[in-house]
Image (spheres, rainbow, N blue to C red):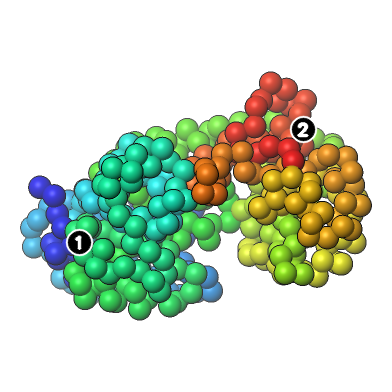
Protein backbone atom coordinates (compact mmCIF):
# COMPACT_ATOMS: atom_id res chain seq x y z
CA UNK A 1 0.00 0.00 0.00
CA UNK A 2 1.38 3.41 -0.97
CA UNK A 3 0.81 5.90 1.79
CA UNK A 4 0.20 9.53 0.95
CA UNK A 5 0.77 12.64 3.02
CA UNK A 6 -2.76 12.35 4.40
CA UNK A 7 -2.00 9.17 6.38
CA UNK A 8 -1.55 11.06 9.65
CA UNK A 9 2.15 11.44 8.97
CA UNK A 10 1.89 15.15 9.65
CA UNK A 11 0.31 14.71 13.08
CA UNK A 12 2.20 16.16 16.01
CA UNK A 13 2.09 13.68 18.89
CA UNK A 14 4.07 12.87 22.02
CA UNK A 15 7.20 10.76 21.79
CA UNK A 16 8.53 9.07 24.88
CA UNK A 17 11.89 9.36 26.56
CA UNK A 18 11.09 6.30 28.71
CA UNK A 19 13.46 3.27 28.98
CA UNK A 20 11.86 1.53 25.98
CA UNK A 21 13.69 4.05 23.79
CA UNK A 22 17.12 2.59 23.05
CA UNK A 23 19.80 4.22 20.90
CA UNK A 24 20.70 1.62 18.29
CA UNK A 25 22.50 3.88 15.89
CA UNK A 26 25.95 3.37 17.32
CA UNK A 27 27.15 6.36 15.31
CA UNK A 28 30.84 6.36 14.53
CA UNK A 29 31.16 9.91 13.22
CA UNK A 30 27.73 11.57 12.84
CA UNK A 31 26.84 14.01 15.62
CA UNK A 32 23.63 15.57 14.32
CA UNK A 33 21.21 12.67 14.61
CA UNK A 34 20.25 9.78 16.88
CA UNK A 35 18.31 6.80 15.59
CA UNK A 36 16.80 4.72 18.37
CA UNK A 37 14.51 1.72 18.75
CA UNK A 38 11.12 2.45 20.29
CA UNK A 39 9.26 -0.78 20.91
CA UNK A 40 8.69 -2.08 17.36
CA UNK A 41 9.38 1.29 15.77
CA UNK A 42 12.21 3.83 15.57
CA UNK A 43 12.66 7.38 16.76
CA UNK A 44 14.87 9.73 14.78
CA UNK A 45 16.14 12.80 16.64
CA UNK A 46 17.75 15.54 14.58
CA UNK A 47 19.93 17.33 17.10
CA UNK A 48 21.16 20.30 15.05
CA UNK A 49 18.45 21.11 12.51
CA UNK A 50 20.14 24.30 11.26
CA UNK A 51 23.07 26.58 11.99
CA UNK A 52 23.32 27.98 15.51
CA UNK A 53 20.36 25.87 16.68
CA UNK A 54 21.82 24.65 19.96
CA UNK A 55 19.15 23.10 22.15
CA UNK A 56 16.64 22.75 19.30
CA UNK A 57 15.71 19.14 18.44
CA UNK A 58 13.21 17.62 16.03
CA UNK A 59 11.83 14.14 16.68
CA UNK A 60 10.20 11.74 14.26
CA UNK A 61 8.61 8.40 15.03
CA UNK A 62 9.04 5.96 12.15
CA UNK A 63 6.23 3.45 12.51
CA UNK A 64 6.18 0.25 10.50
CA UNK A 65 2.45 -0.43 10.81
CA UNK A 66 -0.90 1.30 10.55
CA UNK A 67 -1.90 0.55 14.12
CA UNK A 68 -2.91 3.40 16.38
CA UNK A 69 0.00 5.69 17.13
CA UNK A 70 1.89 3.96 19.97
CA UNK A 71 3.45 7.17 21.19
CA UNK A 72 0.60 8.79 23.14
CA UNK A 73 2.81 9.40 26.14
CA UNK A 74 4.42 12.43 27.68
CA UNK A 75 7.64 13.76 26.22
CA UNK A 76 8.75 16.00 23.41
CA UNK A 77 6.42 16.55 20.48
CA UNK A 78 7.28 14.89 17.21
CA UNK A 79 6.00 13.81 13.82
CA UNK A 80 4.74 10.30 13.11
CA UNK A 81 5.65 8.85 9.70
CA UNK A 82 4.67 5.43 8.44
CA UNK A 83 7.48 3.53 6.76
CA UNK A 84 8.70 2.47 4.35
CA UNK A 85 7.96 5.63 2.39
CA UNK A 86 7.31 5.34 -1.35
CA UNK A 87 6.93 8.91 -2.64
CA UNK A 88 9.64 11.39 -1.67
CA UNK A 89 10.39 15.04 -2.38
CA UNK A 90 13.99 16.16 -1.86
CA UNK A 91 15.20 19.75 -1.62
CA UNK A 92 18.95 19.13 -1.82
CA UNK A 93 21.05 17.24 -4.35
CA UNK A 94 22.84 15.50 -1.48
CA UNK A 95 19.57 13.78 -0.55
CA UNK A 96 19.50 12.24 -4.01
CA UNK A 97 22.80 10.49 -3.44
CA UNK A 98 21.65 8.76 -0.25
CA UNK A 99 18.47 7.51 -1.91
CA UNK A 100 20.31 6.46 -5.07
CA UNK A 101 22.89 4.48 -3.09
CA UNK A 102 20.02 2.57 -1.48
CA UNK A 103 18.61 1.69 -4.90
CA UNK A 104 15.44 3.74 -4.44
CA UNK A 105 15.80 6.53 -6.99
CA UNK A 106 12.35 5.71 -8.38
CA UNK A 107 10.83 6.82 -5.07
CA UNK A 108 11.80 10.46 -5.79
CA UNK A 109 8.80 12.30 -7.22
CA UNK A 110 9.85 15.89 -6.57
CA UNK A 111 13.09 17.91 -6.51
CA UNK A 112 14.37 21.47 -6.21
CA UNK A 113 16.25 22.74 -9.26
CA UNK A 114 15.92 19.75 -11.57
CA UNK A 115 18.32 21.02 -14.23
CA UNK A 116 21.21 20.97 -11.76
CA UNK A 117 20.80 17.28 -10.96
CA UNK A 118 23.67 15.08 -12.13
CA UNK A 119 22.22 11.63 -11.42
CA UNK A 120 21.46 10.08 -14.82
CA UNK A 121 18.72 7.71 -13.64
CA UNK A 122 16.82 10.54 -11.98
CA UNK A 123 17.54 12.69 -15.03
CA UNK A 124 15.67 10.21 -17.24
CA UNK A 125 12.73 10.24 -14.87
CA UNK A 126 12.69 14.04 -15.04
CA UNK A 127 12.81 13.91 -18.85
CA UNK A 128 9.85 11.52 -18.81
CA UNK A 129 7.88 13.96 -16.62
CA UNK A 130 7.78 11.56 -13.69
CA UNK A 131 9.38 14.09 -11.32
CA UNK A 132 8.20 17.61 -10.55
CA UNK A 133 10.27 20.68 -9.66
CA UNK A 134 8.90 22.14 -6.42
CA UNK A 135 11.06 25.28 -6.30
CA UNK A 136 13.36 26.70 -3.62
CA UNK A 137 13.20 28.19 -0.15
CA UNK A 138 10.48 30.86 0.04
CA UNK A 139 9.44 30.13 -3.55
CA UNK A 140 8.15 26.61 -2.99
CA UNK A 141 5.36 25.58 -5.34
CA UNK A 142 2.79 24.32 -2.85
CA UNK A 143 0.29 23.34 -5.55
CA UNK A 144 2.94 21.17 -7.17
CA UNK A 145 3.85 19.61 -3.82
CA UNK A 146 0.23 18.71 -3.09
CA UNK A 147 -0.25 17.22 -6.57
CA UNK A 148 2.74 14.90 -6.07
CA UNK A 149 1.16 13.26 -2.98
CA UNK A 150 4.46 12.85 -1.12
CA UNK A 151 4.83 10.54 1.85
CA UNK A 152 7.61 12.80 3.12
CA UNK A 153 9.67 15.83 2.17
CA UNK A 154 13.35 15.80 3.07
CA UNK A 155 14.38 19.42 3.63
CA UNK A 156 17.21 21.44 5.08
CA UNK A 157 17.35 24.82 6.71
CA UNK A 158 20.19 27.29 7.04
CA UNK A 159 18.27 29.29 9.65
CA UNK A 160 15.17 28.85 11.78
CA UNK A 161 13.04 30.37 9.00
CA UNK A 162 12.55 26.82 7.71
CA UNK A 163 10.16 26.21 10.63
CA UNK A 164 7.47 28.35 8.97
CA UNK A 165 7.58 26.15 5.87
CA UNK A 166 7.34 23.04 8.03
CA UNK A 167 4.24 24.44 9.77
CA UNK A 168 2.54 25.34 6.49
CA UNK A 169 3.21 21.90 4.99
CA UNK A 170 2.01 20.22 8.19
CA UNK A 171 -1.28 22.08 7.84
CA UNK A 172 -1.56 20.50 4.41
CA UNK A 173 -0.98 17.05 5.91
CA UNK A 174 2.52 16.74 4.44
CA UNK A 175 5.37 15.82 6.82
CA UNK A 176 8.78 17.42 6.55
CA UNK A 177 11.96 15.82 7.88
CA UNK A 178 14.94 18.11 8.41
CA UNK A 179 18.24 16.73 7.13
CA UNK A 180 21.28 18.51 8.56
CA UNK A 181 24.12 16.42 7.20
CA UNK A 182 25.77 19.60 5.95
CA UNK A 183 26.55 20.56 9.56
CA UNK A 184 28.63 17.44 10.22
CA UNK A 185 32.29 18.19 10.89
CA UNK A 186 33.70 14.94 9.56
CA UNK A 187 33.26 13.69 5.96
CA UNK A 188 32.30 10.27 7.33
CA UNK A 189 29.75 11.99 9.55
CA UNK A 190 28.00 13.20 6.41
CA UNK A 191 28.18 9.75 4.87
CA UNK A 192 26.69 8.17 8.00
CA UNK A 193 23.38 9.94 7.34
CA UNK A 194 22.66 7.14 4.87
CA UNK A 195 21.39 5.26 7.94
CA UNK A 196 18.65 7.86 8.33
CA UNK A 197 17.45 7.53 4.75
CA UNK A 198 17.70 3.75 5.02
CA UNK A 199 15.35 3.81 8.04
CA UNK A 200 12.70 5.67 6.04
CA UNK A 201 13.07 3.34 3.06
CA UNK A 202 13.12 0.07 4.99
CA UNK A 203 16.74 -0.56 4.02
CA UNK A 204 18.39 -0.51 7.46
CA UNK A 205 20.80 -3.40 6.90
CA UNK A 206 21.84 -2.11 3.48
CA UNK A 207 22.40 1.40 4.82
CA UNK A 208 24.58 0.13 7.63
CA UNK A 209 26.55 -2.11 5.24
CA UNK A 210 27.15 0.69 2.72
CA UNK A 211 28.36 3.05 5.43
CA UNK A 212 30.74 0.46 6.87
CA UNK A 213 32.22 -0.11 3.41
CA UNK A 214 32.76 3.64 2.99
CA UNK A 215 34.23 3.95 6.48
CA UNK A 216 36.63 1.05 5.89
CA UNK A 217 37.81 2.45 2.55
CA UNK A 218 38.29 5.95 3.98
CA UNK A 219 40.28 4.74 6.97
CA UNK A 220 42.47 2.52 4.78
CA UNK A 221 43.34 5.54 2.63
CA UNK A 222 43.98 7.60 5.73
CA UNK A 223 46.63 5.08 6.78
CA UNK A 224 48.50 5.68 3.53
CA UNK A 225 49.53 9.19 4.55
CA UNK A 226 49.52 8.94 8.33
CA UNK A 227 52.96 9.86 9.53
CA UNK A 228 54.07 11.43 6.23
CA UNK A 229 56.85 13.93 6.87
CA UNK A 230 55.94 16.01 3.82
CA UNK A 231 52.68 17.86 4.25
CA UNK A 232 52.22 20.48 1.52
CA UNK A 233 50.62 23.81 2.38
CA UNK A 234 47.12 24.03 0.91
CA UNK A 235 44.88 26.98 0.04
CA UNK A 236 41.16 26.58 -0.67
CA UNK A 237 38.53 28.78 -2.29
CA UNK A 238 38.36 31.87 -4.47
CA UNK A 239 37.48 35.52 -3.79
CA UNK A 240 33.92 36.69 -4.32
CA UNK A 241 33.02 40.39 -4.33
CA UNK A 242 36.33 41.31 -2.69
CA UNK A 243 35.91 38.70 0.06
CA UNK A 244 37.67 35.35 0.23
CA UNK A 245 35.62 32.68 1.97
CA UNK A 246 37.91 29.98 3.29
CA UNK A 247 36.80 26.83 5.16
CA UNK A 248 36.98 27.04 8.93
CA UNK A 249 39.72 25.01 10.57
CA UNK A 250 37.24 22.47 11.97
CA UNK A 251 35.09 22.15 8.84
CA UNK A 252 34.74 18.97 6.84
CA UNK A 253 36.69 20.59 3.98
CA UNK A 254 39.62 21.29 6.29
CA UNK A 255 39.39 17.75 7.64
CA UNK A 256 39.64 16.28 4.13
CA UNK A 257 42.80 18.28 3.44
CA UNK A 258 44.40 17.19 6.69
CA UNK A 259 43.34 13.55 6.21
CA UNK A 260 44.82 13.61 2.71
CA UNK A 261 48.20 14.57 4.11
CA UNK A 262 47.97 18.27 3.44
CA UNK A 263 48.74 21.20 5.72
CA UNK A 264 45.66 23.41 5.62
CA UNK A 265 46.74 27.00 6.15
CA UNK A 266 43.82 27.81 8.49
CA UNK A 267 43.94 24.50 10.39
CA UNK A 268 44.32 26.31 13.75
CA UNK A 269 41.04 28.16 13.33
CA UNK A 270 38.24 26.77 15.54
CA UNK A 271 35.30 27.53 13.23
CA UNK A 272 33.13 24.88 11.58
CA UNK A 273 31.87 27.34 8.98
CA UNK A 274 33.44 29.42 6.22
CA UNK A 275 35.49 32.45 7.18
CA UNK A 276 35.06 35.73 5.29
CA UNK A 277 38.56 37.17 4.88
CA UNK A 278 40.12 40.14 3.15
CA UNK A 279 41.81 39.22 -0.14
CA UNK A 280 45.01 40.92 0.97
CA UNK A 281 45.17 38.80 4.12
CA UNK A 282 44.69 35.56 2.16
CA UNK A 283 47.20 36.60 -0.49
CA UNK A 284 49.81 37.32 2.14
CA UNK A 285 49.26 34.05 4.01
CA UNK A 286 48.85 31.77 0.99
CA UNK A 287 51.21 33.25 -1.60
CA UNK A 288 53.71 30.42 -1.03
CA UNK A 289 51.11 27.65 -0.72
CA UNK A 290 52.07 24.46 -2.54
CA UNK A 291 48.55 23.61 -3.71
CA UNK A 292 45.34 25.46 -4.37
CA UNK A 293 42.04 23.54 -4.45
CA UNK A 294 38.33 24.31 -4.91
CA UNK A 295 38.67 27.67 -6.69
CA UNK A 296 34.93 28.24 -7.03
CA UNK A 297 33.51 28.21 -10.54
CA UNK A 298 36.91 28.65 -12.19
CA UNK A 299 37.47 26.23 -15.06
CA UNK A 300 40.78 27.68 -16.17
CA UNK A 301 43.63 29.78 -14.88
CA UNK A 302 42.33 32.61 -17.07
CA UNK A 303 39.13 32.63 -15.03
CA UNK A 304 41.21 33.22 -11.91
CA UNK A 305 43.25 36.03 -13.46
CA UNK A 306 40.02 37.70 -14.57
CA UNK A 307 39.16 38.19 -10.90
CA UNK A 308 42.50 39.63 -9.81
CA UNK A 309 45.81 39.69 -11.69
CA UNK A 310 47.74 39.39 -8.44
CA UNK A 311 46.51 35.82 -8.05
CA UNK A 312 48.85 34.90 -10.88
CA UNK A 313 51.74 35.55 -8.51
CA UNK A 314 50.70 32.73 -6.19
CA UNK A 315 53.20 29.85 -6.19
CA UNK A 316 50.44 27.30 -6.77
CA UNK A 317 49.36 29.27 -9.84
CA UNK A 318 52.88 29.58 -11.26
CA UNK A 319 53.63 25.90 -10.61
CA UNK A 320 50.37 24.61 -12.15
CA UNK A 321 49.12 23.13 -8.90
CA UNK A 322 45.52 24.32 -8.95
CA UNK A 323 42.80 21.65 -8.80
CA UNK A 324 39.06 22.07 -8.88
CA UNK A 325 36.30 19.64 -7.95
CA UNK A 326 34.38 20.07 -11.22
CA UNK A 327 35.34 17.00 -13.24
CA UNK A 328 31.76 15.69 -13.20
CA UNK A 329 29.47 18.52 -14.25
CA UNK A 330 26.41 18.66 -16.50
CA UNK A 331 25.54 21.19 -19.19
CA UNK A 332 23.56 23.32 -16.73
CA UNK A 333 26.41 23.46 -14.22
CA UNK A 334 25.13 20.75 -11.89
CA UNK A 335 28.21 19.38 -10.12
CA UNK A 336 28.28 15.77 -8.95
CA UNK A 337 30.71 16.77 -6.19
CA UNK A 338 27.72 18.35 -4.42
CA UNK A 339 25.68 15.21 -5.03
CA UNK A 340 27.38 11.81 -4.88
CA UNK A 341 30.50 12.90 -2.98
CA UNK A 342 28.46 13.16 0.24
CA UNK A 343 28.09 9.37 0.29
CA UNK A 344 31.58 8.74 -1.08
CA UNK A 345 34.08 10.83 0.91
CA UNK A 346 36.59 8.03 0.38
CA UNK A 347 36.65 8.90 -3.34
CA UNK A 348 37.24 12.56 -2.53
CA UNK A 349 40.02 11.59 -0.15
CA UNK A 350 41.55 9.36 -2.82
CA UNK A 351 41.60 12.29 -5.26
CA UNK A 352 43.25 14.59 -2.73
CA UNK A 353 45.88 12.06 -1.70
CA UNK A 354 46.74 11.59 -5.38
CA UNK A 355 47.13 15.37 -5.70
CA UNK A 356 49.21 15.96 -2.55
CA UNK A 357 51.08 12.63 -2.53
CA UNK A 358 50.96 11.18 -6.07
CA UNK A 359 53.54 8.53 -5.18
CA UNK A 360 51.00 6.94 -2.81
CA UNK A 361 48.42 6.36 -5.58
CA UNK A 362 50.43 6.43 -8.82
CA UNK A 363 47.76 4.92 -11.12
CA UNK A 364 44.77 6.81 -9.73
CA UNK A 365 42.62 8.84 -12.13
CA UNK A 366 40.76 11.82 -10.67
CA UNK A 367 37.08 11.23 -9.97
CA UNK A 368 35.93 14.67 -8.82
CA UNK A 369 39.13 16.70 -9.15
CA UNK A 370 41.10 17.83 -12.17
CA UNK A 371 43.94 20.26 -12.75
CA UNK A 372 43.09 23.70 -14.12
Q: Position of residue 303 (x, y in %)?
A: 75, 51
Q: Is disc 1 in contact with disc 2, using a CB cutoff of under 8 Å?
A: no
SS type, badge 1: helix
Residue 82 visible in the snapshot:
yes
Disc 1 residue crowd, few under 14, some 14–19, many 20+, Cα 10 Å: few
Indicate which disc, 1 or 2, sits on the residue closer to the N terminus: 1
Q: Foreground: 53 or 2? A: 2
Q: Position of residue 30 (x, y in %)?
A: 49, 53
Q: Compared to 179, does 64 lie above or below? A: above
Quadrant containing the C terminus is top right
Q: Position of residue 283 (x, y in %)?
A: 87, 60
- For residue 177, side relative to residue 268 (left or right): left
Q: Compared to 45, does 209 lie above or below? A: above
Q: Residue furthest top?
A: 363
Which numbered mark, 1 or 2, is in the foreground of this view?
Answer: 1
Residue pictured at 69% horizontal, 21% vertical: 363
Residue highlighted by disc 2: 357
- For residue 58, side relative to residue 244 (left or right): left
Residue highlighted by disc 1: 147
Residue pictured at 33% horizontal, 43% vertical: 127
Residue pictured at 79% horizontal, 56% vertical: 306
Residue pictured at 73% horizontal, 58% vertical: 238
Amino acid sequence: MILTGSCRMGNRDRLSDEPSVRDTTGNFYARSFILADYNQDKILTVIHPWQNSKGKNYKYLLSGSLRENPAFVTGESGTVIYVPVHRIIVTSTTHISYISELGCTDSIVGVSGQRFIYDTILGKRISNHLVGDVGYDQNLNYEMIISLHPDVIFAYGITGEISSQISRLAQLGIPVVLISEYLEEHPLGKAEWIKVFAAFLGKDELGDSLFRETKSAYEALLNLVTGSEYRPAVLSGLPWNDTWYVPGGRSFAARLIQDAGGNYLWRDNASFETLPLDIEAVYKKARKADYWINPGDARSKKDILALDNRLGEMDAFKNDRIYNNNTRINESGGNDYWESAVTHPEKVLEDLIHIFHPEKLPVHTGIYYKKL
